[in-house]
Image (spheres, rainbow, N blue to C red):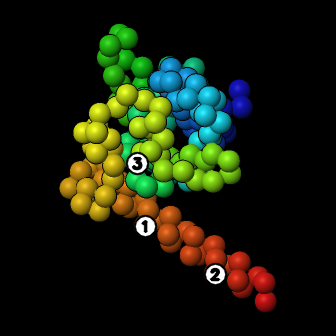
Amino acid sequence: LFDVDIMLHMNNASYLTHAELARWEWSAFGGTLDANLKSKSFFIVTASMIRFRREIAPLKRFYIETRLGGIDDRNLWAYQTFHHAGKSDNERGKILAQILTQAVITKNGKVINPRDWVEEHFPVSKSVLDDLTTTSSDAESLFGEKASRFKHLEEVMRESASVYDESTMK
């Protein structure tokens, strides 16, 4: 009931709640939750960007696809897409919304390198990690472009918050 707004479709805040639950499920099934608990490390969301494409009507089935989009020396990005449920379990429906979430991994209160963390806890080949590592030369790739624009938006938001904070301290 609280997922529905006055326009009788899922309200904007609910997308983020469902995405958070999907990331928890993804981390539990993928083994990252267990690795976090054993190593006493934590994923902390530092930013999210959402793009709404189509409404989700009340009682309309949908599913969320979650994947690790990329990593650099500080951040990792989860890319999530909301889809209408297809006619069969194997059929993917159209994308309803897209969310790009930036997070850091902390241990003992300090941000740690996500690539090092992945190498330590999972049997992942170097080539897979290299494919996940985002660099400025990734601009040709679709995810590389998203990550680059996301970083730029984050810088602009940070700067505007600093300017505001400084002006209110006078």
Q: Secondary structure at mark 1?
A: helix
For marks 3 and 2 on the same chain, the one whose residue lies earlier in the sequence: 3
Which structural element holds mark 3?
A: strand
Q: Dot 3, how many residues are within 10 Å of its Cα: few (below 14), some (14-19), or many (20+)?
A: many
Residue sitting at 63 percent across and 54 percent down?
110
Residue at (42%, 25%) from the top-left corner?
Answer: 84
Q: Position of residue 81 (x, y in %)?
A: 42, 35
Q: Which residue is mark 2?
A: 163
How far is the residue under mark 3 from the one under mark 2? 29 Å
Q: Of the two numbered discs 3 and 1 on the same chain, state the one appearing first in sequence.
A: 3
Answer left or right for 3 relative to 70: right
Q: Which residue is mark 3?
A: 71
Identify which amino acid the numbered label 1 is placed on: His
Q: Is residue 100 above or below residue 28?
A: below
Q: In x, y percent, where is residue 159?
A: 56, 75
Residue at x 58% of width, y 53% of height? 111
Toward the viewer: 158 or 94?
A: 158
Residue identified by numbered label 1? 152
Q: Residue furthest bottom?
A: 170
Res. 54 in view = no
Residue flagged by tag 2: what amino acid is it?
Answer: Val
Question: Residue flagged by tag 3: what amino acid is it?
Answer: Ile
Q: Kindly tell me whether residue 39 is visible in this rendering.
A: yes
Mark 3 vs mark 2: give the one in front.
3
Which element type, helix, strand or loop, lies under badge 2? Answer: helix
